[in-house]
Amino acid sequence: MPSAVPLRTDFSARELRRLAKQSRDNNQSRRLLSLAAVLDGMSRDDAARIGGMDRQTLRDWVHRFNMDGPDALLDAWTNGPTPRLSVEQKSELAALVEAGPDRQADGVVRWRRIDLKLVIKKRFGVDFHERYVGTLLKKLGFSHLSARPRHPGQDVETIAAFKKTSRKR
């Protein structure tokens, strides 16, 4: 059976309890009290139970405490992964979608997710999955609308002449 990870000795159990009392973070206080119990000679299993964790979790906190002291017992929250497109690139993409495709340059008459995926890869060098392009459009405030298709060679006057209207009363 492996031996317990030694706990640094520059803090006494009394000091750890004092730090736990002063702490504004409940989780840090629980961890400090568990470490104080270990320094008092309590078994690691019982000390972990005091802090509401298992022995392995206590061992992980001991490693962090040994490396960086009491401040390492705070929860380390992050903001998540950095976005692959910057705010400027997203606004450029939104303007591109709003303007619609150029039939000559883009080769399409309406944007599909697969088309936008290729445009994003070409312009920004970021390769998204086709499904994520739909999610990205939703985040940018667009919704899925499918307009009735129009042939590029349609004559507006012919359409107006054949348009059905109700008689005036």
Image: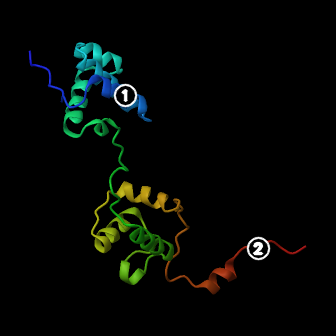
* Three-letter amino acid code of the residue under disc 1: Arg
Q: Residues within 10 Å of mark 1 (few under 14, many from 20)?
A: some
Nearer to the camera, 131 or 11: 11
Quarter-of-image position of residue 43: top left
Residue shown at 52%/70% (left/top)?
149
Please indicate, yes or no, whether residue 110 appears anywhere in the rendered image.
no
Relative to 58, is 77 on the left or the right? right
- Name the residue tied to disc 1: 18
Q: CA distance from mark 1 to mark 2?
A: 85 Å
The percent position of residue 7, horizontal first and vertical second, equals 18, 27
The percent position of residue 129, horizontal first and vertical second, equals 32, 57
Quarter of the image with the C terminus in it:
bottom right
* Three-letter amino acid code of the residue under disc 2: Thr
- Name the residue tied to disc 2: 165
* Colour style of the rendered protein structure: rainbow
Residue shown at 21%/26% (left/top)?
59
Residue occupying the far right of the picture? 169
Nearer to the camera, 165 or 104: 104
- Tell me the element at label 1: helix
Residue shown at 51%/73% (left/top)?
98
Q: Earlier in the sequence, mark 1 or mark 2?
A: 1
Quarter of the image with the N terminus in it:
top left
Q: Residues within 10 Å of mark 2 (few under 14, many from 20)?
A: few
Nearer to the camera, 67 or 165: 67
Residue shown at 28%/23% (left/top)?
13
